[in-house]
Amino acid sequence: MARTAGSHSDITGPRVREAALRLFARHGFAAVSMRQIAAEVGVQAGALYNYTPDKQTLLFELMRNHMVELLADMRRDSAVSAPVQLDRFVRFHISFHHARPDAVFIAYMELRNLEPDNFATIEALRRQYETVLEDILRAGVDGGLFDVGDTKVATLAVIAMLTGVTTWFRPDGRLSLGDVQDQYCQMVTRLVGAPGGSV
Amino acid sequence: MARTAGSHSDITGPRVREAALRLFARHGFAAVSMRQIAAEVGVQAGALYNYTPDKQTLLFELMRNHMVELLADMRRDSAVSAPVQLDRFVRFHISFHHARPDAVFIAYMELRNLEPDNFATIEALRRQYETVLEDILRAGVDGGLFDVGDTKVATLAVIAMLTGVTTWFRPDGRLSLGDVQDQYCQMVTRLVGAPGGSV
DNA sequence: GATTTAACTGAACAGGCGTTTAAATCCAAG
DNA sequence: CTTGGATTTAAACGCCTGTTCAGTTAAATC
């Protein structure tokens, strides 16, 4: 034997992913070259292929990691009432996405650059996430606590609304993240027709 | 003199823009080559330069046309009440965007591929559109008909929610466009805390 | 200090990129 | 039918693309 596995790869590997994440988010997958990513890491383009089989897989892994992390971090507690679950979901979505603006951007913008198999995988994870919210809404409707027209439509409307926050929220702006979370909780609560929603 | 101006350009010009619109929407600006656009039109790449000074301008013109058309088609009638204006805004946004899925896609996804000056122009048009909704909400708040936390936040939330429709709505699906418009009107009405909103 | 091998370089590959330009083509007016 | 300008082609420009690979470097083990 000799050199222990990953004497530099422990460092370079993550750096490659970080650089790719930032550059893909900033300029788009198709507009970023492997040489640009390599330059950001301080390495030649060929060295990247120690860490990914190709550019497409690099994108796919970034998106999958993001979605897996999203699903893992979300705690689903069906013991509490639907309105409380909804409130938690809203706050979780906003804070989780705010902490990873680049990954969010990529996950929503680069879907069309995924090869069919990879697209199907990411799409399945995304639907899984949507289902969590949909289940909350349906539970609320079944319990007579919510009143929405079509549950699926309401689900997609709420997620679109929440994800939009990442595109404009700046922590040094007029409102704190907590302020924004509070307002979105109120808006979503009203949107689903919860009794306490309207003042 | 000879051939009247634009004997073929009347045909080729629009075809170039149509092909570019579709291809940019499908694959992304950076991933589409001038040769691909030319092939779609049935022409050599060089011929495109009779219709656009360069690729960047082709993208910019598509986006600007979309935004200008959006602002032009919207009829602002401040004589009616804020809730009615809001209802009309929601229905208009959904149907206008549904009729132009490719242009919508480009207008929201290709902003980062615009050069600074072009970006500023599109951004200004977009803010102009947002202001229309914001004015409606503020009028409603001032008249005691709406109750939102921060008006700007509510504006962005509603627009994000409405624009999201384009990503999933299919006319051959479970719901008609009218159904979707109805449900979004109800959700938005409740979201802004209008009195009749909650059942 | 010799050996081993992970990590990386640098050059090369075939092909595509946006754009330019001279020459060819086309067609309506004279 | 000739003419002349609008329209398009075909080829070329220099540069960049993702990926491969033989060769170099350097660190950890013996």
Image (tube, coloured by chain):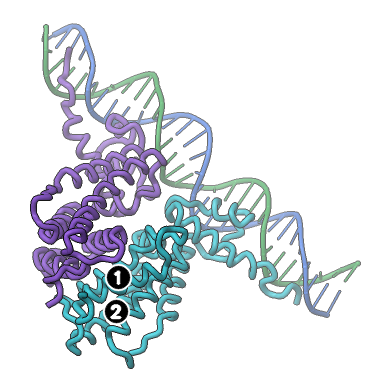
Chain colours: A purple, B cyan, C blue, D green
Which type of secondary structure does the marked residue at label 2 adopt? helix
Q: Which residue is mark 2?
A: B133
The quadrant of the rendering that contains the C terminus of chain A is: bottom left
> Residue at point 37% right, 59% down?
B167
Q: What chain does badge 2 belong to? A: B
> Residue at point 32% right, 84% down?
B85
Q: Quadrant of residue B51?
A: bottom right
The quadrant of the rendering that contains the N terminus of chain A is: top left
Image vertical order of residue B9 relative to residue D24, above or below? below
> Which mark identifies residue B159?
1
Image vertical order of residue B120 relative to residue C12, above or below? below
Which type of secondary structure does the marked residue at label 1 adopt? helix
Q: What chain does badge 1 belong to? A: B
Residue B4 percent across, percent down from the top left: 72, 75
Residue B35 percent across, percent down from the top left: 55, 51
> Which amino acid, by three-letter code, is at mark 2?
Leu
Q: Nearer the viewer, residue B14 or A87?
A: A87
Q: Is residue A94 visible?
A: no
Question: Decide: marks 2, 1 in contact (CB < 8 A)?
Answer: yes
> Which amino acid, by three-letter code, is at mark 1?
Ile
Mark sitting earlier along the chain (2/1):
2
> Residue at point 29% right, 66% down?
A149
Dots 2 and 1 on the same chain: yes
Q: Quadrant of residue B137?
A: bottom left
